[in-house]
Amino acid sequence: MRNLSVFCAISAMAMFAACSNDAGGGDDGGDDDVPPVPTWSIDVDMSGLDRYAPADATTWPIAGTVTASDGVDGVTIAGTAAAVASDGSFTGDTMLAPGLNPIAILATDKAGHTRKANRSVLAASYLAAGAHNREAAALVLTDAVVAAMGAGLVEEAGDVDVAAEILARDVLSSDSQCTTWPVEASQGQVQVNLELDGADLWLNIRIPNLYVYFEGQCSGLLSTIPIGGEMGGTVDIWTRLTPNPQAGANCLTAFRHTAPQVTISPWYFDVWGLSGPLQSWLVNLFSGGKSEEARAQLRSEIGTRANTMLAQQLADISVFDRTSELELLSRPLAMHLCVASLDRVGTGSNARLIARVAAAATGSGTRVAPGAPQTAGTVPAPAAGELLLDGNLVSQLLFAAWQDGGLTKLGVETVESDVLALVAPEIGLRYPSGTDVLVNLDGDLPAYVRATPGGMGDLKVEIGDLMLDLVVGEDRLFRVGAVLRLDLDLVPVDGKLVPTVVGTEATAHVLDELYDGNDDLLESVIATKVGSTASALLSGAALSLPELPGLGAPADVTPDAGGRYVRIRMQ
């Protein structure tokens, strides 16, 4: 696109009347009029600098190589003279603080010419690409959320078929007087639910309308007498669940359970003789004590069978597992969410069960870095009715987008050569008036994200070493390095959070130029432009939250005082 609005500031600051297509002069660009490149040069190679420091680093070695056509006079690092060897290599230490550390590097030749080589160093812990952040979110469990989390259990435990198991038996009961066997059995649809009792998590399996018709025979005084009967009721199986985390697992996929408690209510039992004059006697004989005996036997057998089944099913189960697709920095990403742990907090009537959610962000990029920079900080407890969201999750997403080239943009903007000629007049002589100059963007470092209690936004995103190359064909007119700080509000929209830029702060430094120009002027304009460009790159992004019924939609976002999390009030 063609955009002269911000670059018009160059002419204003240079006390020209306005930016116009005639600015900078120049004719058809004949070779006879093309000015030569400067006779002096200073080149600083910082490619060997390790810009990823550990979180606890307080100092960091800075090293590079400088060459100068007029001879190297010296190099300063953050204002302190560095040791420069005869081959131009230089070293020095600089102080670091947690987060992004912009470092001023200045090379000077013996004629007094200077060249900036500013770079940034990140001091952080790093989460490897695609790895799970096990503290990405947290919430207090409610009955509604717990009920929604039971979907995986329904699939695993919902196939309990007591009626079929009864029918598969050859003998239903047998004693010295009577033997019975099943003839017909049926049951209603199995219902599986998770329920909270304070901070205790219970699993309930309900088998409604169990019905069994049986027949049998009893030994009479003179002969064997056939009988028939029926029994049934609604079966409830209760067991208390506790997490059983697996070594090395990111997601909670296993639970322990207590011995199942089985009730059958309402219970009915009836028996009758199928022939002969002793029917009434048989009914009294068989049905009196047999009703409770049959009920107790059924409860015991169902409990034993449920105990075995639950031990198998709860050893590998999905409680909450979601993957959502989103786009950030114009790159497609996948965000995986799962329950990492269930933690009991508090005692007695104040006890609560908190679910902590693990998150991983993945894209298709392979740019080399140790991982997503993570902000240190304690993990606070969420309040009722809110979701606690780690700012490091935003860092994970931005990192995955950065790896995939989200901050590498060719032709992110176009400016006319006439505008740049106001900074370096030789450009107006080298190129015809109106020549397009492409602005290419490349972010050398991923973003560092932290919550900002009391700040302008909910989060601050800091990006160092944004390199902007202003080029015409094969000619690089300028290379400018920038440091960008964005204040972001996470705005609730349609159940998602939309990162919205509410403030920018940028600094820029001319690192290389084809012709000497007014560096201060160019740096000022570039710094202004970088902020607006980055805001446009973030437009259209939306962060999906865990889609749990009962969780509600986000209503408001407040940064936590610890500087790592944001608290999202849910409707």
Image (spheres, rainbow, N blue to C red):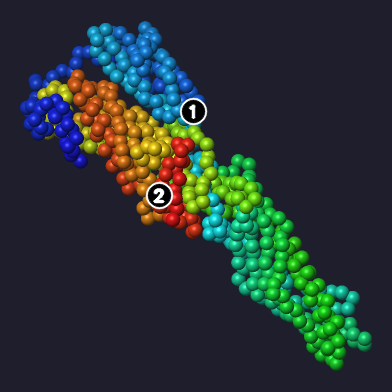
Residue that appears at 71% across and 65% down: 262
Query: Residue 100 placed where, x, y %?
Result: 40, 28
Q: Which residue lies furthest to the bottom in this view?
A: 277
Residue type for callout 1? Ala
Q: Is residue 375 left or right of residue 537?
A: right
Residue that appears at 20% across and 13% down: 39
Quadrant location of the C terminus in the rendered image: bottom left
**Residue 187 is at least partly visible in this image:** no
* Label 1 residue SS: loop
**Residue 249 is at least partly visible in this image:** yes
User: In this rendering, which labeled residue sits more in front, label 1 or label 2?
Assistant: 2
Cβ atoms at labels 1 and 2 below 8 Å apart: no
Say which of 348 and 407 sits in front. Answer: 348
Quadrant location of the N terminus in the rendered image: top left
* Label 2 residue SS: strand
Q: Quadrant of residue 179?
A: bottom right
- Mark closer to the chain start, 1 or 2: 1
Asked if 234 appears above or below 506 in the picture, the reply is: below
The disc label shown at residue 539, or none = none
Q: Residue furthest right?
A: 221
Within 10 Å of the Cα at label 1, are there few (<14), some (14-19), or many (20+) other Cα atoms?
Answer: some
Q: Is residue 395 left or right of residue 254?
A: left
Q: Residue furthest front?
A: 349
Asked if 278 appears above or below 58 in the picture, the reply is: below
The residue at which mark 2 appears reads as 556
Residue type for callout 2? Asp
The disc label shown at residue 55, or none = 1
Say which of 233 and 567 sits in front. Answer: 567
Residue that appears at 76% across and 72% down: 295
Asked if 34 appears above or below 409 in the picture, the reply is: above
